[in-house]
Amino acid sequence: MKTPVSRPKRVLIASSHSLFGKGLQNLLEQRWGADVLVVGLVSTTEQAATALQELQPDLVVVDYDDETLNRDDFLARFMEVEGALRVVLLSLANDKGGAEAVVYDRRTMQAEY
């Protein structure tokens, strides 16, 4: 009996810093191999909103330190997307030792949050 093959997790990376985006893409692909598929690298809130609809990622990683991405607008749009989507706000700032990330999951998050 064949075991069902699961599809790779679809990841969208939002950052206007190409080094951040490409570095994260390489890290994910090296770490998870065929279990992850980076479906897009976007650099603006508008591109991210379009990509959320068109690419239907399972996970969006947002560069928290990126001033060009409007986090409030992005998270408001994230709340409107259908499906089981998670967003991770990732900061490279070292004020907490780089050991923390914020995960937003609509299944556990209030819309007004």
Image (cartoon, grey):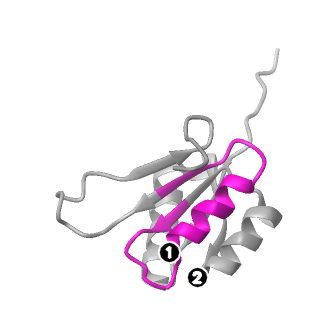
x 52%, y 67%: residue: 25
Whether residues under marks 2 and 1 lie with C-beta atoms below 8 angstroms apart, the answer is yes
Kindly identify which numbered label has been placed on residue 81. none
Give residue 70's position: percent from left, percent from top.
53, 76
In terms of depth relative to the viewer, which is nearer, 37 or 56?
A: 56
Q: Quadrant of the N terminus?
A: top right
Quadrant housing residue 54: bottom right
The residue segment tinted magenta is 61-88
Give residue 44's position: percent from left, percent from top.
60, 82
In terms of depth relative to the viewer, which is nearer, 25 or 81?
A: 81
Against 109, residue 76 (above or below) is: below
**Residue 63 visible in the displayed image:** yes
x 76%, y 72%: residue: 50
Kindly identify which numbered label has been placed on residue 43. 2
Against 94, residue 97 (above or below) is: above
Q: Residue furthest top?
A: 1
The local crowd at label 2, few if under 14, some if 14 to 19, many if 20 or more residues have their Cα within 10 Å, is: many
Q: How far separated are the C-alphas under marks 2 and 1?
A: 9 Å
Kindly identify which numbered label has been placed on residue 21. 1
x 62%, y 77%: residue: 45
Residue 73 horizontal side relative to residue 31, left or right: right
In terms of depth relative to the viewer, which is nearer, 31 or 67?
A: 67
Q: Secondary structure at mark 1?
A: helix
User: Mark 2 is on which residue type?
Assistant: Ser
In terms of depth relative to the viewer, which is nearer, 31 or 71?
A: 71
